[in-house]
Amino acid sequence: MNRATEVRIPRRVVTGIKDGKSVFVSDGPTANAHVYASVPGHLTSVVYATAAKPVLPQDHAEQAPPQIMITPEPGATKLMIVVFPPDSVFAAIDHQAAFEEQAIHIPGLIQAFEPDAPGMHTTDTVDYDIVLDGEIWLELDDGAETLLKQGDVVVQCGTRHAWRNKGDKPATLCFVLIGAERGS
């Protein structure tokens, strides 16, 4: 793997309470992180998940195991870190192989993507999206788009959208997905 496609698995530190005192429950690589063989430089990781009404102290069991359903139930949350390689990488991949790999590692989310509009998808979530590194374009309906840079935040309210990395360097984003119900 060359330097341009090296991807770092996010470190996750989880705290808890034991015998009435704060403790580190775990500290290490995110258990649910996947670097895609079919898409060089692409990473998805589900760092943590909570129920609609989390209870404290949190269970010491893994909260975001591999192959967990990505789309949260109403009120539940998922915290994800995603590395987007440049669009030029996506243009040169085997899309069927990528879909099959993503179906294993981001179930529920990959099915929200539109086959006839690459990258476009809609989920029943309110998302807090934070650009951690790089630059990326957010595209909405009818080609409306805006450039986002490191430190920018998007509040995505269940809209149809796509992420476009038009540059030549990876973009890393943090997503907090909050499950929602669609009104009529």
Image: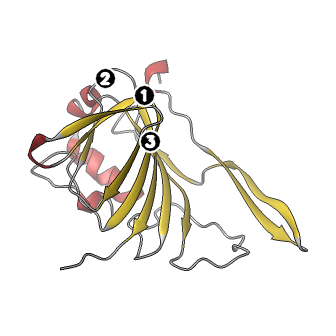
Identified by mark 2, the residue type is Gly
Residue 106 visible in the current orientation: no
Query: Which of the pair 103/153 is nearer the observer?
Result: 153
What's the mark number on residue 173? 3
For image coordinates 86% across by 71% down, the residue present is 18
Question: In terms of secondary structure, where does tag 3 sit?
Answer: strand
First in sequence: mark 3 vs mark 1: 1
The residue indicated by pointer 2 is: 167
Q: Quadrant of residue 130?
A: top left
Residue 49 can be seen, yes or no: yes
Residue contact at pointers 3 and 2, CB within 8 angstroms? no
Q: Residue 59: horizontal and vertical position, in percent?
A: 70, 74
> Are the two marked residues, 3 and 1, in contact with CB atoms closer than 8 angstroms?
no
Q: Residue at x 82, y 69 (%)?
A: 17
**Alpha carbon distance from label 3 to label 1:** 9 Å
**Number of the label disc, if any, that sits on residue 134:** 1
